[in-house]
Amino acid sequence: MINIILFGPPGSGKGTQSAKLLEKYKLSHLSTGDLLRDQLKRETKLGLEAKKFMDKGLLVPDEVVIGMIESKLDEAGPDTKGFIFDGFPRTVEQAKALDDLLTKKGTSLMSLIALEVTQEELVKRILLRGETSGRADDRDRATVMKRVQEYDNKTAPVADHYKSQGKYNAVQGIGSIDQIFGNLSLVMDDLMVANRS
Ligand code: ADP
């Protein structure tokens, strides 16, 4: 299976680029942000619990998101070519859980691909997105800054976890959507070749 983590800080373009990758490489999308927002919209118990964290720019507890990913992986049919993980794992604990879940499925992670964007650009992009996205956590500068801080403290170490496994790749995340996608595709194509040989 082709299992890829698309990695990067909030606002780095993971959602936009994932959509293009799914289409080109025929992979399935697993976005914990989207899954949580869906729970929230349906006002499930899990959604109402998660909202308390999301509205403050804090990470939702590991066991909640790990449980969600586990059930999505279980639902996947035998024809699934692979997954793009978007917004997951966000802590080293989640990364270890993902490694275990993939091993149990008889597969493994192919690569973590990081989108590199400066902090100044991130905050600008998120606040702009907040004008139209309808996401409460995109509108308030303090909440946005908190999310960036959570990323630096808890999520950035996930990259080191996969660096030590020799699975880390990075792509410049500034430029036009198509330029960035072009760079991502080069990395993906190299990975596919390496996977075949
Ligand atoms: P962004 O990448 O723009 O921050 P997401 O849609 O990925 O947005 O996530 C929105 C919010 O959902 C996060 O700020 C966090 O509160 C919660 N969340 C999403 N994924 C995770 C995760 N893997 N672990 C913990 N919390 C998460």
Image: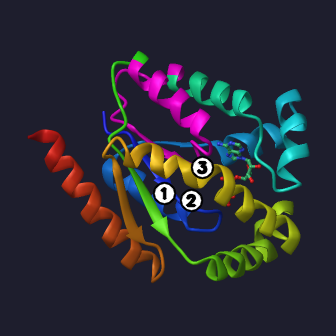
At a point 30% along the width and 63% down the height, the residue shown is 185
Q: Amino acid at mark 1?
A: Ala
At a point 36% along the width and 21% down the height, the residue shown is 78
Q: Which mark is on residue 87? A: 3
- Secondary structure of residue under mark 1: helix
Q: Nearer the viewer, residue 171 or 179?
A: 171
At a point 48% along the width and 56% down the height, the residue shown is 18
Contact between marks 1 and 3 (CB within 8 A): the answer is no
- Secondary structure of residue under mark 2: helix
Above-or-below relation of 192 to 103: below
Q: Which mark is on residue 171? A: none
User: Which quadrant: the C terminus?
Assistant: top left
> Which is in the foreground here, disc 1 or disc 3?
3
Above-or-below relation of 108 to 145: above
Q: Is mark 2 within 8 Å of ligand 1?
A: yes
Instruction: Tell me if residue 81 is in the magenta stretch.
Output: yes
Could one spot residue 35 in this view of the protein?
yes
- Secondary structure of residue under mark 3: loop
Contact between marks 2 and 1 (CB within 8 A): the answer is yes
Between disc 3 and disc 2, whose residue precedes?
2
- Relative to 18, is 26 on the left or the right? left
Q: From which residue to which does the magenta span run?
A: 74-103
Q: For marks 3 and 2, give the CA distance.
A: 9 Å
Circle 1 crowding by C-alpha within 10 Å: few under 14, some 14–19, many from 20: some
Instruction: Tell me if residue 87 is in the magenta stretch.
Output: yes
User: Which quadrant: the N terminus?
Assistant: top left
Residue matched to label 1: 19
Q: Amino acid at mark 2?
A: Gly
Residue matched to label 2: 15
Between disc 1 and disc 3, whose residue precedes?
1
